[in-house]
Image (cartoon, helix red, strand yellow):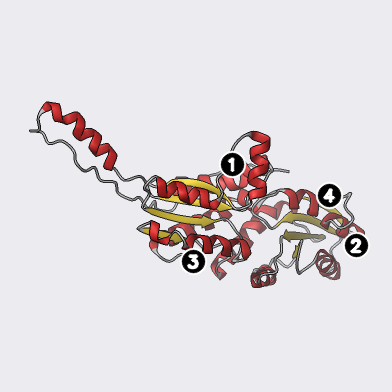
Amino acid sequence: MMQHRVTRRGFLGAAIASMGLVGCASATAPAQDSGQNATQAQATVQPKPAIVVTSFGTSYASSRHATIGAIESDIREAFPGYDVRRAFTSQIIIDHIEKDTGRHIDNFEEAMDKLVSEGVREVVVQPTHLMDGFEYQDVKKSLESYQDKFDKCALGAPLLASKEDQVAVAHAVHDAMARFEDDDTAICLMGHGTEAESNSLYATMQEVFDAEGFKNYFIATVEATPTFADAAKAAKDAGYTKAVLRPFMVVAGDHANNDMADPEDPESFVSVMTEAGFEVQCVIEGLGQLDAIDEVYVKHVQDAIDGGGAQ
């Protein structure tokens, strides 16, 4: 079930880099020189600074457009003075999309190398990762090798970087799921999970939901803790008899459709919840479809431009 983006938020103040024309012909220059000078002027115009929106990626085209595409679009609107580029970090997904559609999406290094070759002098990299996990750290490490190739090279923070971000995300999800709220229904959110220390953010987000009064929200992960069984037990102990499942991920791709919503897989989230006695329905919507989530990423880009991005 796809949620359509029917409203547009107002953007943050755009940060627009100035571009100066140099070597232009003067009014008194000979006519025969004007064409040469104009060519020289064009050649010395600095290209726009760039924002590289860097995502793991998804092979699900509809979700790719509705989530990653929406984030990129909002960033593009908020910063019209910047050239917004796309990069994926999963080479498997890049290759899959190219095989199926013939369309190539740059990996992170390809996107950065293009900016270097084009003479771009300022770049902001904004990952769409939820947290400072292995994928985010890989981007950060790779970016270090480009620091001496640009005048300014900044990294934006992941989605859940601060308490302010975490509260904003909790409210964005709650607002999106309000249509399912009743006294019998648990809202169960499925994250990916990671072996990195940042996996603790799932427990932190559970605490945030509880503190904000959203006590019918329960978080589980595909590959770490809390598990599907943990969420089922917590919801059951709280007295809920129905459950709505939603991915706590930027995109609603393979994990959402299979690990969460496949009733034929006995280990899927929907199967575990059904086996626990819940009446279950699934919402196949990524976090990137929510305007309020995209707004957090826009804020992180602005922080990076201002010099207060990820450290």
Q: Earlier in the sequence, mark 2 or mark 4?
A: 4
Q: Earlier in the sequence, mark 2 or mark 1?
A: 1
Q: CA distance from mark 4 to mark 3?
A: 37 Å
What residue is shown at x 75% (from left), y 67% (from top)?
224
Find disc 1 in the rendering and name its residue. Answer: 6
**Distance of mark 2 from mark 3, alpha carbons?**
41 Å
Using the image, tell me which numbered label, if any, was put on residue 262: 4
Of the image marks 1 and 3, the number of the one nearer the N terminus: 1
Give the mark nearer the N terminus: 4 vs 3: 4
- Would you identify the image quadrant in which residue 162 lies? bottom right
User: Which residue is disc 2 drawn over?
Assistant: 276
Name the element at disc 4.
Answer: loop
Q: Secondary structure at mark 2?
A: loop
Q: Between 139 and 68, which is closer to the camera in this rendering?
A: 139
Disc marking residue 310: 3
In-front residue for pair 56/284? 56
Q: Label 4 sits on what residue type?
A: Asp
Q: Is residue 54 visible?
A: yes
The secondary element bearing badge 3 is classed as: loop
Of badges 2 and 1, nearer the viewer stands 2
The residue shown at (64%, 68%) is 212
Given the image, on which type of amino acid does mark 2 rest?
Answer: Ala
Q: For the residues marked 2 and 4, what is the alpha-carbon distance in whole angstroms?
A: 16 Å
